[in-house]
């Protein structure tokens, strides 16, 4: 079936969904649905980076269990509602986000340029903060060397190998890393013997913020640090950057979920590029098939959100149970070194296990960076320029990976503190950027035929997410201005 531009009466049927999707719950269905865990595994693994291994532990170290609710809020809003809302559009339409957002009102492509520029600017700050923390840990392990040099070697190795990786290999690696993280943090959490009552109080005391202990206020790495800025940065980093949410939809399309599995998908995308998703039929049977086709991302996103929440909470709990009583606060270039105390509680022989687990997790984060930003660059620039759309993806992959690696090394050696790097990245990419993506998701939903739009509960969840992100973004901007410019 050929879809002709300008003919808005054309309709296209969804491929027949796998019968197991509509079947009653069984072991076979459960195992089949568990196998969908892939794109969200990359999101969860990459998100762990500085957000969980550094900031979650540091948060537990100064607040105890009192800010578990902040982790829960971040995972519910961003990793459930927003990630589902954005992936849902591509599964239903088969269209890439770049082509869809290029049709937004206003100058053509303005939204795409905004996301691209934010991504290109902030990627080096993310990489530098993570590599700098790894460098500090490696200097501690080996007992010599400049943390920046170790960080440079770590970043060059991970990004260099990542440039040559396929998406399939990346996904398989990140699934393994997710398993390592869950197992490692489970052991660490059990070792730390947390208080169950304090855990429950901290998880559901929404809005309550513990005061800074006196020993924290005396810490040179934390003195005079604004509490709202700290909360905004932690909230931003839990769940990862703006680019992760945007690229999730593309990864779902690579799996052939929903309309992307149609044998006519290239014709559909070419038609949608100019006309939008007007080819979706309003017949009840087609709407029902569309809902069944959403099964893979529901399982994928649900599992990813669980892994991220579990790992984030485990790191925070370990910081609360072990570092808080010892008055240890990660800071400077030793953001990861104090965490070994968590494993020392069991046995000195467990410290190397901690080192391997954390370095493997952060290696996976940096390894995925070229794929993450190259996908978005190729998709968005391809939506704006036909010549880029025809360019081989591997060429874009090489250019983006080289740029991120080179600029990241420059930032790391610039003398900027890792915490400052995190503050900047959190304000622009994880808060303001994700806020804009959330509003963009609401626009995508409104562009769908009424029968295919989000249900009321999902829509309300995305709207609440947008409101929370708007508030957190405003806090980030005002607090960053007061700290770095206002004085």
Image (spheres, helix red, strand yellow):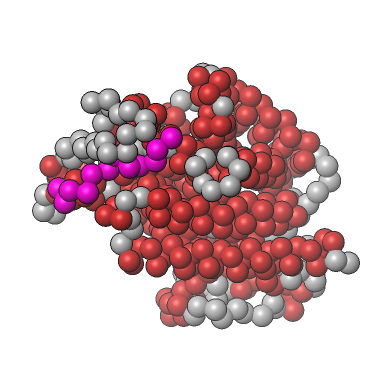
Does the rendering let one see residue 467?
Answer: yes
Q: Which of these two is toward me, 304 or 265?
A: 265
Please give the name of the residue rendered at 74% of the width and 67% of the height, measured from the top-left corner. 479
Residue 134 figure quarter: top right
Please give the name of the residue rendered at 26% of the width and 54% of the height, measured from the top-left corner. 451
Please tell me how many numbered marks the rendered image carries: 0
Please give the name of the residue rendered at 46% of the width and 54% of the height, measured from the top-left corner. 443
Residue 293: x and y in percent read: 24, 45
| Left or right, 466 with reference to 18 | right
* Type of secondary structure dominating the magenta stretch: loop
Q: Which of these two is toward me, 60 or 2?
A: 2
Q: Which of these two is toward me, 338 or 20?
A: 20
Residue 340 figure quarter: bottom right
User: What's the magenta region?
Assistant: 274-285
Q: Which of these two is toward me, 384 or 117?
A: 384
Q: Quadrant of the C terminus?
A: bottom right
Confirm whether the magenta stretch covers residue 276: yes
| Left or right, 135 with reference to 355 | right
Does the rendering let one see residue 318?
Answer: no
Q: Quadrant of the N terminus?
A: top left
Please give the name of the residue rendered at 74% of the width and 71% of the height, measured from the top-left corner. 226
Confirm whether the magenta stretch covers residue 336: no
Q: Is 148 rendered above or below residue 232?
A: above
Residue 420: x and y in percent read: 75, 55
Residue 414: x and y in percent read: 83, 42
Residue 377: x and y in percent read: 57, 33
Q: Is 123 rendered above or below residue 3?
A: below
| Left or right, 52 with reference to 99 | right
Q: Is 76 rendered above or below residue 242?
A: below
């Amino acid at each position: 079936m050929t879809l002709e531009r300008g003919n808005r009466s054309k309709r296209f049927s969804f491929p027949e969904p796998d019968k197991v999707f509509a079947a009653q719950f069984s072991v076979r269905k459960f195992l089949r649905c568990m196998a969908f865990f892939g794109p969200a595994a990359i999101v969860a693994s990459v998100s762990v980076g500085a957000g969980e291994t550094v900031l979650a532990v540091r948060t537990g170290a100064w607040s105890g269990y009192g800010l578990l609710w902040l982790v829960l809020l971040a995972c519910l809003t961003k990793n459930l509602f927003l990630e589902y809302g954005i992936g849902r559009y591509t599964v239903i339409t088969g269209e890439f986000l770049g082509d869809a957002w290029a049709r937004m009102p206003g100058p053509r492509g303005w939204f795409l340029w905004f996301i691209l520029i934010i991504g290109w600017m902030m990627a080096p700050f993310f990489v530098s903060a993570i590599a700098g923390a790894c460098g500090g840990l490696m200097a501690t392990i080996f007992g010599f060397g400049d943390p920046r040099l170790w960080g440079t070697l770590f970043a060059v190795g991970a990004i260099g190998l990542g440039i040559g990786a396929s998406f399939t290999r990346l996904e398989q690696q990140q699934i393994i890393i997710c398993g390592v993280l869950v197992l490692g943090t489970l052991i660490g959490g059990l070792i730390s013997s947390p208080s169950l009552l304090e855990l429950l109080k901290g998880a559901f005391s929404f809005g309550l913020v513990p005061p800074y202990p006196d020993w924290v206020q005396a810490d040179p790495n934390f003195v005079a640090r604004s509490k709202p800025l700290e909360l905004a940065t932690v909230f931003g980093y839990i769940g990862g950057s703006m680019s992760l949410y945007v690229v999730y939809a593309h990864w779902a399309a690579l799996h052939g979920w929903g309309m992307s599995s149609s044998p006519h998908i290239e014709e559909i995308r070419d038609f949608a590029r100019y006309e939008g998703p007007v080819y979706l039929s309003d017949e009840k049977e087609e709407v029902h098939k569309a809902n069944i086709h959403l099964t893979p991302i529901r399982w994928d996103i649900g599992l990813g959100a669980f892994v991220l929440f579990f790992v984030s909470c485990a790191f925070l709990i370990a910081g609360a149970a072990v570092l808080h009583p010892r008055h240890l606060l990660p800071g400077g270039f030793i953001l990861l070194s104090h965490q070994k105390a968590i494993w020392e509680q069991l046995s000195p022989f467990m410290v190397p296990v901690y080192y391997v687990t954390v370095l493997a997790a952060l290696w996976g984060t940096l390894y995925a960076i070229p794929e993450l930003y190259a996908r978005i660059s190729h998709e968005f620039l391809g939506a704006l320029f036909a010549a880029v759309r025809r360019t081989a993806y591997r060429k874009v992959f090489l250019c983006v990976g080289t740029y991120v690696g080179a600029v990241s090394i420059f930032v790391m050696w610039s003398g900027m503190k890792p915490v400052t790097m995190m503050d900047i990245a959190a304000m622009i990419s994880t808060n303001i950027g994700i806020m804009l993506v959330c509003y963009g998701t609401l626009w995508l939903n409104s562009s769908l035929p009424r029968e295919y739009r989000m249900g009321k509960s999902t829509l309300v969840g995305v709207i609440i997410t947008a409101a929370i992100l708007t508030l957190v973004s405003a806090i980030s901007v005002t607090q960053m201005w007061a700290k770095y410019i206002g004085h």
